[in-house]
Amino acid sequence: DAKTTQPPSMDCAEGRAANLPCNHSTISGNEYVYWYRQIHSQGPQYIIHGLKNNETNEMASLIITEDRKSSTLILPHATLRDTAVYYCIVRVGGGSQGNLIFGKGTKLSVKP
Amino acid sequence: DTGVSQDPRHKITKRGQNVTFRCDPISEHNRLYWYRQTLGQGPEFLTYFQNEAQLEKSRLLSDRFSAERPKGSFSTLEIQRTEQGDSAMYLCASSLDSPWGKNIQYFGAGTRLSVL
């Protein structure tokens, strides 16, 4: 079973920031938080990951709480093309664990 | 583009037939994964390879399913005696496993199987 809890759906206005929450209260010290998204009829796309520090790349920012029990993915200026299902996944970093365990994710709808 | 490539993109077959899917990973990646996704659900892990060795298999991978990666490059997933319940999107992903690496899995576009 997935180790994370996400809201099933969210709406966001185009051009505004989209903040997607994720709870992972049972996360272990060596587990990272990964975010993927899946646009309709495509394979999942890697967005970002982090251990305990906040991370930013060209796609998004990841904010992890100090106790690491929750995190927020931020899309700073959402566009219609960001409409997708967003998955928050917790797993051990490096190569020691093979598979990703996906939950049902959050369906983000960006509206004009 | 040198991303993960899957073939075919769509496959329609009759119940009881055998089907085979192919996945070509990103060239320097040593790990290759297969997942299955049904409508409204997240992808579910099936199996993965490190080079040519199959290291883990999910209990979802019944005896009718077999995966190979003979030379540590491309992989095939075969389903024998297909059933309607096998209808799903089959996703392939690859990653570069190293102690200092991020081990990010990159996915292909998938093969959508419809069993009639």
Image: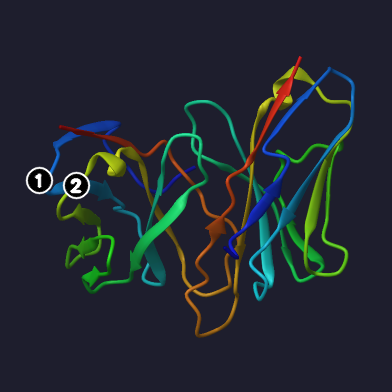
Tag of residue A78: 2
Quarter of the image with the N terminus of chain B is bottom right
Can you name the residue that lies furthest to the top here? B116
Can you name the residue that lies furthest to the bottom here? B100
Q: Position of residue B8 (x, y in %)?
A: 73, 40
Above or below, B46 against B95 in this view is above
Q: CB of mark 2 within 8 Å of CB of mark 1?
A: yes
Q: In this view of the protein, which residue sits in the foreground, B2 or B53?
A: B2
Above or below, B111 against A59 in this view is above
Kindly state the secondary structure of the residue where label 2 is placed: loop
Q: CA distance from mark 2 to mark 1?
A: 6 Å
For the point 74% across and 18% down, the residue is B84
For the point 22% across and 46% down, the residue is A20
Amino acid tagged 1: Arg
For the point 17% across and 63% down, the residue is A65
Tag of residue A16: 1
Chain label for disc 1: A
Q: Are marks 2 and 1 on the same chain?
A: yes
Answer left or right for A92 relative to B53: left
Answer left or right for B25 relative to A54: right
Quarter of the image with the C terminus of chain B is top right
Kindly state the secondary structure of the residue where label 1 is placed: loop
Q: What scheme was used to colour the molecule?
A: rainbow
Amino acid tagged 2: Ala
Answer left or right for A67 relative to B108: left
Q: Quadrant of residue A52?
A: bottom left
